[in-house]
């Protein structure tokens, strides 16, 4: 049964990329604050979450709610389309569980056929259509209303500010001033909404953008460091290696972070 409350929501696409060949896909994620959509039209990969294993291929897509732990692995190169998006509303998942759909129910046929030729602008439009389809097909009982929606206002505002500029950097105090609140209130809302401090959320977001750019963009590491607001390539590389355990150059060459055992 499709849901009837999604019409109250606004979908905001954070990023959408099509990568023709991912050589390795091994992640252990924790408390990722955005929704995810994955489709691998060639090859196959596996996703693990809360004891559930999903084989991802051309016929299968997966939708992952925010703050849902998951791991991935793949043994062979595959093409990969992913969307990161936010649902700006008073809705939140009732449970942090992944949902699996046949790709034909979510992705229009014309997008399936042409996605490898799309420009970044076309990919973003396609991402909006797909994310909306996915949200529409989730049943009503998948969502719940936030009990105290007003307490999320500053968090949502802060996330929108951060998403507007890849190079954005600020302390909790500075970001709170931009949102029109206090650092204590903003910190409390970030922890309640995302299970993370403002500082760690910003780092996760910036490193996620860095990984996306390294895997799907032809820009140099210096250009990526500049885009993300780092003073130079060396500072960026130091932060990146501390976060992923591997340098940006190695990450790009290997198609991802070091191998890790899936977390079930």
Image (tube, rainbow, N blue to C red):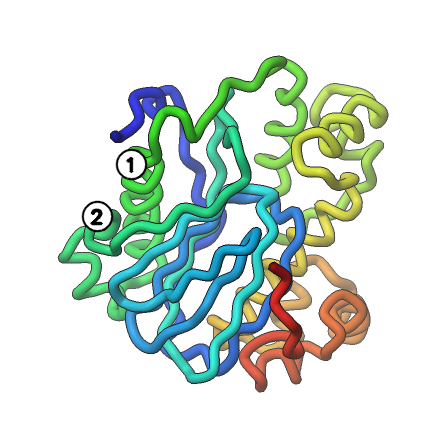
| Quadrant location, the C terminus | bottom right
Residue 108 higher or lower than 81, as above or below: above
Task: Give the residue at mark 1.
Answer: 137
| Quadrant location, the N terminus | top left
Instruction: Compare marks 1 and 2 and give the one earlier in the sequence.
Output: 2
Q: How many marks?
A: 2
Answer few, some or many: residues within 10 Å of disc 2's Cα (few below 14, many 20 plus, some between 14 and 19).
some
Residue 168 higher or lower than 250, as above or below: above
Location of residue 116 (image quadrant): bottom left
Instruction: Give coordinates of residue 147: x percent, y percent.
Output: 59, 14
Answer few, some or many: residues within 10 Å of disc 1's Cα (few below 14, many 20 plus, some between 14 and 19).
some
Task: Give the residue at mark 2.
Answer: 105
Residue drawn at the location 41% of the way across and 52% of the way down: 37
Whole-Å distance between the Cαs marked 1 and 2? Answer: 9 Å
Q: Secondary structure at mark 1?
A: helix
Q: Is residue 188 visible?
A: yes
Location of residue 113 (image quadrant): bottom left
On the picture, is 90 further left or further right than 245? Answer: left
On the picture, is 22 further left or further right than 160? Answer: left
Instruction: Give coordinates of residue 28: x percent, y percent.
Output: 64, 63
Residue drawn at the location 14% of the way across and 57% of the way down: 110
Q: Is residue 163 visible?
A: no
Residue 92 higher or lower than 116, as above or below: above
Query: Is 224 in front, or is 68?
Result: 68
On the picture, is 32 further left or further right than 64? Answer: right
The residue at the far left in this view is: 110
Instruction: Give coordinates of residue 180: x percent, y percent.
Output: 73, 20
């Amino acid at each position: 049964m499709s849901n009837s409350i999604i019409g109250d929501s606004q979908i905001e696409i954070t990023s959408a990329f099509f990568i023709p060949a991912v050589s390795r896909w091994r992640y252990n994620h924790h408390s990722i604050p955005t929704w995810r959509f994955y489709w691998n039209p060639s090859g196959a990969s596996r996703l693990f979450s809360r004891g559930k294993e999903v084989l991802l291929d051309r016929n299968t897509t997966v939708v992952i709610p925010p703050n849902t732990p998951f791991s991935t692995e793949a043994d062979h190169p595959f093409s990969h389309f992913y969307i990161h998006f936010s649902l700006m509303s008073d809705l939140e998942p009732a449970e942090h569980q992944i949902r699996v759909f046949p790709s034909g129910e979510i992705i229009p046929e014309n997008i399936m056929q042409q996605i490898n030729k799309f420009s970044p602008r076309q990919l973003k439009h396609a991402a909006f259509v797909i994310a909306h389809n996915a949200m529409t097909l989730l049943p009503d009982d998948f969502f719940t209303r936030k009990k105290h929606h007003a307490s999320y206002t500053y968090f949502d505002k802060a996330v929108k500010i951060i998403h507007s500029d890849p190079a954005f950097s600020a302390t909790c105090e500075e970001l709170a001033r931009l949102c029109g609140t206090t650092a204590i209130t903003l910190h409390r809302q970030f922890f309640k909404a995302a299970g993370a401090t403002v500082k760690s959320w910003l780092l996760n977001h910036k490193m996620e953008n860095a990984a996306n750019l390294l895997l799907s963009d032809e820009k140099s590491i210096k250009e990526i460091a500049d885009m993300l607001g780092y003073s130079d390539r060396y500072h960026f590389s130091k932060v990146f290696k501390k976060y992923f355990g591997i340098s940006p150059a190695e990450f790009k060459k290997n198609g991802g972070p070091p191998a890790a055992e899936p977390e079930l």
